[in-house]
Image (cartoon, coloured by chain):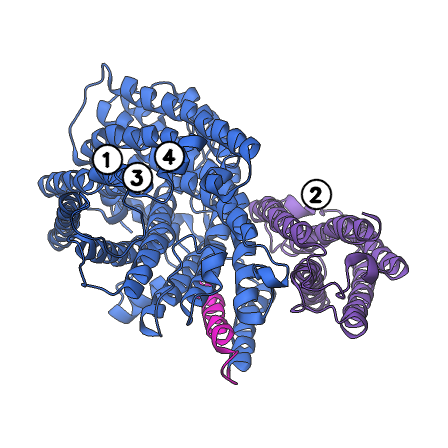
Chain colours: A purple, B blue
């Protein structure tokens, strides 16, 4: 099948994200890339665990002083829901329902922005209330690097999905852009999975462990 | 667009290479850049041996010596060995599996330019206040206290180059999984393709820890973080772990393609199917797997405790088993074969005893208790040079001679090739064999000089003479390359006459679309099978049709240039007000180029059937 071909609902294949060779390559290559990203985050998690609560003086804030479960709960809900909305978006993509896909992607972006907002608020709260900064201790460096790397991934994902939406807003779905939407949503799920681990390892284990 | 290559001016050729996404041209770029850095790293090695030739020498200062050894190691591993292997992977692997290009031609070009700008950035340190001086391992306890910007160059330069390697690895993996010609099953893939496959998988999982390690070091040195600052709660052992979780797989990333190259050579020039093909594949995969389980054997003296040391010692020794399988398979390939002594075969012959020496000392240093004696002595220097030079460098030199005709359409001179071999091989053993004993006699590594009368004088002189021999060998190779390029005697598809795999079934150099019709693969050593069946070439698996090709692009160059600019900003932002704007500018160039790539449709183009037929009549030259 040609990537440039004008598509209709009848011609739309069952798996538009991998119906050309380019798309198959993109699909597999992106999965492999996520494998590499997994080791990247694993290294950051290991660093965080080694440096958790390692501070220069006794009056510095530790994990159990900092974290606040209600706020983390809100952030988690926002991000997990955004993963669900991106699933709906891909469902509509597979059914050649461009407008519905765009609506659900738009919701995904809004929820992602909400998550980023809570994260910005959270970081500024730690900095101003607890003097817990990137440079104040090894714990601070490790915390902001791990959670910040994730936040940067979220920000990049938002820019990516928005660019795709704006670029394709007028021309609908094709076999050329379907895999692009699909890998962007894969990336979004990956970010979500990483957050599940951050929630567990950083926040839950920080409060109770 | 026509398929017929047009005459271009010099500027046109340069632009062609700056924008190319053709795996064969990218291979040439890797070969030139990697070759250049190999010469730079070699010069640094010569400086080291001149300084150590006699006791109490003052050829270079102690500080300069630290910079030279750091840059020698870093350059040789990251900027010479890796790209030279990438050159052959790019040049040969797609041909061996019967593909028209790699899966992501654009990403392939991006990988090269990232490596190139990272390497240039790292080497600019020589002119901008001093090179990194904390050793190629750059242990944090040394590195975060290193004065000047040397280590910053290391951190930023390797970060950029490492990204290039990572995406290159992903690209090769997808190419091998998705782009094999009809009939090319996994267990019919040539061993060089198999080793590229496993090495790429290792790159995928080994480079991200390095990325993280370098990022942490960058944050510590340039942005005030405290990962390795013990007074602030930091821990320098984290660097050691991250570095070696990358670093140990890295040596297998280097040696596995070398094994692949020699496997091809033994089969071609013994004119016999590789002995134990399946066990070779098994051993390659097993080495790739075990390679991730042994990193702490570099840290026996760090104090991880006897349990950790014992586990890592045993795991390390286990790697000797699959490696031994390979050595015997190569020997049995030659056994009963009709061996032809060409230059690549000389290297393959020299490789076996050299590499086995390195393997034996490897088992010695893997013995945790004994390693306390060997650690940080010249014994270790001798060990890793026996595996890296005796394995990887010999393989690169062998591959250069083997695939030169496929890449450039002309043979290297065989007599000069053998002269290169003898100088290099004798020089190599002269340089490094004695270093085992220097180490056992107590000479520590990384010292810039030594006192006379400790029994080190004569041995060090021998070692330095060996370095001169190796240099002569490399000079002869360069002369060989220039001379044969000037003469430029064209060769046919299969210049060695005994080619077994698909790359030998198409013209040298291949047309830019590689295969006019994808070949039908009917077994291991696909081309050899057809020759034995009395056919001239491969049976096509498809009718002649239009070929889809990717467009050239300048964007990979710009993405890499942006990171190069941003790296300067990051390095100087603490002391100069222009640092931050430069970081932003550089990142804007990078992300802007990525954005452009994302929004600009790039469907590639088609070569039409009629043009292919025309090419056919003209003798398929491109």
Q: Mark 2 lies on which chain?
A: A
Percent from the top left, x then y, of residue B435?
A: 24, 41
Few, some or many residues within 10 Å of mark 4 (<14, 14–19, 20+): many
| Distance between mark 1 and mark 4 Cα atoms | 18 Å
Is disc 2 placed on a helix, strand or loop? loop
Left/right of residue A43 with respect to residue A108 in the rendered view: left
Q: Where does label 4 land, which residue?
A: B192
Q: Mark 3 lies on which chain?
A: B
Q: Which chain carries label 1?
A: B
Whether residue A89 is visible: yes
| Distance between mark 2 and mark 3 Cα atoms | 58 Å
Q: Where does label 1 land, which residue?
A: B494
Location of residue A164 with respect to B467 vertically, above or below: below
Is disc 1 placed on a helix, strand or loop? loop
Location of residue A78 with respect to B498 vertically, above or below: below
Q: Nearer the viewer, mark 3 or mark 1?
A: 3
| Distance between mark 4 and mark 3 Cα atoms | 31 Å
Looking at the image, which is closer to me, B136 or B448?
A: B448
Residue ranking furthest to the bottom: B577
Magenta region, mostly helix, strand or loop? helix
Tell me whether marks 2 and 3 sit on the same chain.
no
Percent from the top left, x then y, of residue B470?
A: 17, 46
The numbered mark at residue A15 is: 2
| Distance between mark 2 and mark 1 Cα atoms | 42 Å
Residue displayed at 21% across by 58% down: B47
């Amino acid at each position: 099948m040609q990537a440039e071909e004008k598509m209709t609902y009848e011609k739309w294949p069952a798996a538009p994200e991998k119906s050309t060779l380019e798309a198959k390559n993109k699909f597999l290559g992106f999965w492999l890339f996520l494998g590499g990203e997994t080791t990247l985050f694993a290294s950051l998690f290991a660093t965080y665990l080694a440096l958790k609560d390692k501070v220069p003086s006794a009056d510095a804030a530790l994990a159990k002083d900092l974290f606040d479960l209600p706020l983390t709960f809100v952030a988690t809900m926002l991000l997990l829901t955004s993963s669900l909305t991106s699933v709906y978006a891909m469902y509509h993509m597979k059914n050649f329902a461009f407008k519905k896909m765009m609506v659900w992607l738009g919701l995904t972006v809004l929820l992602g922005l909400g998550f980023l907002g809570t994260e910005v608020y959270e970081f500024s709260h730690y900095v101003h209330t607890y003097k817990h900064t990137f440079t104040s201790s090894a714990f601070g460096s490790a915390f902001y690097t791990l959670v910040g790397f994730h936040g940067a991934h979220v920000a990049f994902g938002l820019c990516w999905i928005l660019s795709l939406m704006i670029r394709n807003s007028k021309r609908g779905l094709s076999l050329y852009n379907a895999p692009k939407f699909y890998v962007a949503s894969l990336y979004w799920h990956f970010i979500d999975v990483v957050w599940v681990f951050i929630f567990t390892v950083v926040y839950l284990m920080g409060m109770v462990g | 667009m026509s398929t017929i290559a047009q005459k271009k001016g010099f500027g046109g050729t340069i632009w062609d290479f700056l924008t190319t996404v053709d795996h064969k041209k990218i291979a040439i770029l890797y070969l030139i850049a990697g070759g250049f850095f190999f010469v730079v790293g070699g010069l640094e090695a010569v400086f080291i041996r001149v300084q150590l030739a006699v006791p109490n020498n003052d050829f270079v200062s102690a500080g300069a010596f630290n910079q030279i050894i750091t840059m020698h190691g870093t350059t040789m591993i990251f900027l010479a060995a890796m790209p030279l292997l990438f050159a052959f992977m790019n040049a040969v692997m797609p041909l061996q599996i019967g593909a028209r290009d790699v899966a992501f031609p654009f990403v392939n070009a991006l990988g090269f330019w990232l490596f190139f700008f990272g390497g240039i950035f790292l080497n600019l340190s020589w002119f901008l206040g001093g090179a990194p001086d904390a050793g190629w391992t750059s242990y944090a306890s040394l590195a975060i206290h290193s004065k000047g910007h040397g280590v910053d160059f290391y951190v930023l330069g390797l970060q950029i180059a490492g990204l290039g390697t990572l995406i290159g690895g992903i690209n090769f993996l997808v190419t091998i999984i998705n782009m094999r010609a009809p009939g090319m099953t996994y267990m019919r893939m040539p061993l060089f393709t198999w080793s590229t496959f496993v090495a790429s998988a290792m790159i995928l999982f080994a480079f991200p820890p390095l990325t993280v390690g370098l990022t942490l070091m960058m944050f510590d040195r340039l942005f005030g973080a405290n990962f390795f600052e013990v007074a602030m709660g930091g821990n320098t052992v984290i660097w050691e772990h991250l570095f070696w979780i990358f670093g140990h797989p890295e040596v297998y990333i280097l040696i596995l393609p070398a094994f692949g190259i020699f496997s091809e050579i033994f089969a071609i020039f013994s004119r016999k199917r590789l002995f134990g093909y399946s066990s070779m594949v098994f051993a390659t995969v097993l080495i790739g797997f075990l390679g991730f389980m042994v990193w702490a054997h570099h840290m026996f003296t760090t104090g991880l405790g006897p349990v950790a040391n014992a586990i890592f010692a045993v795991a390390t020794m286990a790697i000797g088993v699959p490696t031994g399988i390979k050595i015997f398979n190569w020997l049995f390939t030659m056994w009963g074969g009709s061996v032809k002594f060409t230059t690549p075969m000389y290297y393959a012959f020299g490789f076996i005893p050299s590499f086995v020496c390195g393997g034996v000392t490897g088992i010695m240093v893997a013995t945790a208790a004994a390693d306390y004696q060997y650690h940080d002595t010249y014994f270790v220097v001798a060990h890793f040079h026996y595996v890296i030079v005796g394995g990887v460098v010999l393989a690169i030199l062998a591959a250069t001679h083997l695939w030169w005709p496929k890449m450039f359409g002309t043979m290297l001179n065989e007599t000069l090739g053998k002269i290169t071999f003898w100088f290099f091989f004798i020089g190599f053993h002269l340089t490094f064999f004695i270093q085992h004993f220097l180490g056992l006699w107590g000479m520590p590594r990384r010292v810039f000089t030594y006192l006379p009368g400790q029994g080190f004088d004569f041995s060090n002189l021998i070692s330095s003479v060996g370095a001169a021999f190796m240099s002569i060998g490399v000079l002869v190779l360069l002369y060989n390359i220039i001379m044969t390029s000037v003469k430029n005697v064209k060769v046919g598809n299969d210049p060695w006459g005994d080619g077994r795999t698909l790359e030998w079934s198409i013209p040298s150099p291949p047309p830019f679309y590689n295969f006019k019709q994808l070949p039908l693969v009917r077994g291991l050593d696909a081309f050899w099978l057809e020759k034995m069946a009395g056919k001239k070439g491969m049976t096509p698996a498809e009718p002649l049709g239009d070929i889809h090709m990717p467009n050239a692009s300048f964007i990979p160059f710009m993405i890499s240039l942006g990171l190069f600019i941003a790296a300067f900003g990051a390095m100087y932002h603490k002391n100069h007000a222009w640092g931050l704007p430069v970081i932003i500018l550089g990142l804007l160039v990078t992300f802007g180029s990525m954005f452009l790539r994302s929004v600009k449709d790039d469907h590639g183009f088609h070569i039409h059937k009629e043009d292919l037929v025309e090419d056919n009549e003209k003798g398929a030259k491109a």
